[in-house]
C-alpha cells in the first residue's frame, strides 16, 4: 500500500513535531496538511521534530479535506471512541484488521490516512467520508490517544505487514525442514520409550503439538536435537 498521511487541522506545534518524527521512523516521505492551525515551521515544531523537520518544511497544505483526498483510492480514518462513529459509520475495525483488509487490495492502493485534530479528532462529517475506520482499543475511562501515539500504532501495523509479506519480519531465524522436525520427534519418542509411563502416545502427541505450535527455528531445533542425542 502507498500511504498518504493527511493531518486535519493540527493545533499544537509539539504534536506536529512528534508526528514528523513518527512519520520518518516508519518511512513516510511527505506530510499533507488540511488547514493547519499551528505553524508548521514554528519554534516548537522544529524543536520536537528533531531530524524530521524537513517533513514539516516540505509539507503540502490544502484548504479542505476533499482536495486532500481526491487522489486517494481509499480513505482510512481513526477513532478511539466507537460511539462517535456508530451513528453514521458501519465499517469500524480494530486497527490490525483494518490494515490487513487494506493489504489485501494490493500494493498499488493509495491510502489516505487521516489523523484528526489534536483536540476534537475527526468530525462526524469527516468520518462519514472515510471508507474504513480503524479503532484503537484503549482504557474506556480515558480512550483518546495523543495523535502522534495513534499514528505510531497504525504505521507500525502497516510496516509489520510489509515485513511479514517480504519475509524480512521473520525474527526467529531460518525455519527447519520437515525431515529435521521428524528427526527431533523420533529422538523424543526413543527417549520416552526407555521410561515408565502410563500413556507414551499421549506424551508424544503433546510434544508434537508443542513443536508445531511454537514453530522453532532451525537453530533452536538443532539445539533440541543435540540435547536429546
Image: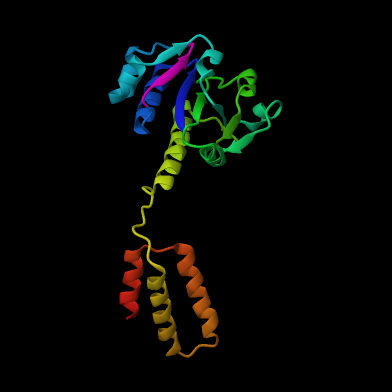
Work out which residue is located at the far top of the displayed protein and give it: 63
- Residue 82 among magenta residues: no
Instruction: Tell me where residue 80 sits by quadrant.
Output: top right
Location of residue 136 in the rendering, given as x and y in whole percent from the top left corner: 55, 36
Instruction: Name the foreground residue: 29 vs 179.
Output: 179
| Segment colored magenta | 29-37
The image shows residue 99, relative to residue 222, as above or below, that is above
Q: Is residue 127 left or right of residue 187?
A: right
Question: Tell me, what colour scheme is on the image?
Answer: rainbow
The residue that appears at 31% across and 70% down in the rendered structure is 223
The residue that appears at 43% across and 42% down in the rendered structure is 160
Report whether residue 11 is seen.
no
Location of residue 102 in the rendering, given as x and y in whole percent from the top left corner: 54, 36
The C terminus - image quarter: bottom left
Q: Is residue 144 left or right of residue 18?
A: right
Instruction: Tell me where residue 58 sits by quadrant.
Output: top left
Location of residue 56 in the rendering, given as x and y in whole percent from the top left corner: 36, 17
Location of residue 28 in the rendering, given as x and y in whole percent from the top left corner: 38, 28
The residue that appears at 46% across and 37% down in the rendered structure is 158
Work out which residue is located at the far right of the displayed protein and give it: 87
The residue that appears at 36% across and 57% down in the rendered structure is 172
- Residue 36 among magenta residues: yes
Instruction: Name the foreground residue: 175 vs 123.
Output: 175
Instruction: Name the foreground residue: 44 vs 93.
Output: 93
Instruction: Tell me where residue 227 sits by quadrant.
Output: bottom left
Report whether residue 7 is seen.
yes
Q: Please give the count of numbered marks on the rendered protein.
A: 0
Instruction: Name the foreground residue: 1 vs 200.
Output: 1
Amino acid at each position: 500500500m502507498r500511504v498518504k498521511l493527511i493531518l486535519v487541522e493540527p493545533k499544537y506545534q509539539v504534536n506536529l513535531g512528534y508526528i514528523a518524527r513518527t512519520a520518518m521512523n516508519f518511512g513516510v516521505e511527505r506530510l499533507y496538511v488540511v488547514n493547519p492551525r499551528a505553524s508548521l515551521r514554528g519554534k516548537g515544531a522544529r524543536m520536537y521534530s528533531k531530524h524530521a523537520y524537513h517533513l514539516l518544511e516540505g509539507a503540502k497544505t490544502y484548504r479542505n479535506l476533499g482536495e486532500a483526498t481526491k487522489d486517494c483510492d481509499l480513505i482510512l480514518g481513526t477513532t478511539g471512541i466507537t460511539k462517535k462513529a456508530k451513528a453514521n459509520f458501519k465499517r469500524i475495525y480494530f486497527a490490525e484488521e483494518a490494515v490487513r483488509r487494506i493489504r489485501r487490495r494490493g500494493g498499488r492502493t493509495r491510502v489516505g490516512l487521516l489523523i484528526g485534530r489534536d483536540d476534537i479528532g475527526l468530525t462526524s462529517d469527516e468520518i462519514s467520508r472515510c471508507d474504513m475506520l480503524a479503532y484503537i482499543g484503549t482504557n474506556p475511562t480515558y480512550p483518546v490517544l495523543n495523535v502522534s501515539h495513534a499514528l505510531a500504532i497504525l504505521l507500525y501495523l502497516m510496516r509489520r505487514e510489509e515485513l511479514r509479506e517480504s519475509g524480512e519480519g521473520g525474527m526467529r531465524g531460518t525455519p527447519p525442514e520437515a525431515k529435521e522436525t521428524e528427526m527431533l520427534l523420533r529422538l523424543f519418542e526413543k527417549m520416552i520409550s526407555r521410561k515408565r509411563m502410563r500413556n507414551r502416545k499421549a506424551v508424544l502427541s503433546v510434544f508434537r503439538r508443542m513443536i508445531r505450535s511454537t514453530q522453532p527455528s532451525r537453530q533452536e531445533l538443532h539445539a533440541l536435537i543435540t540435547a536429546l542425542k
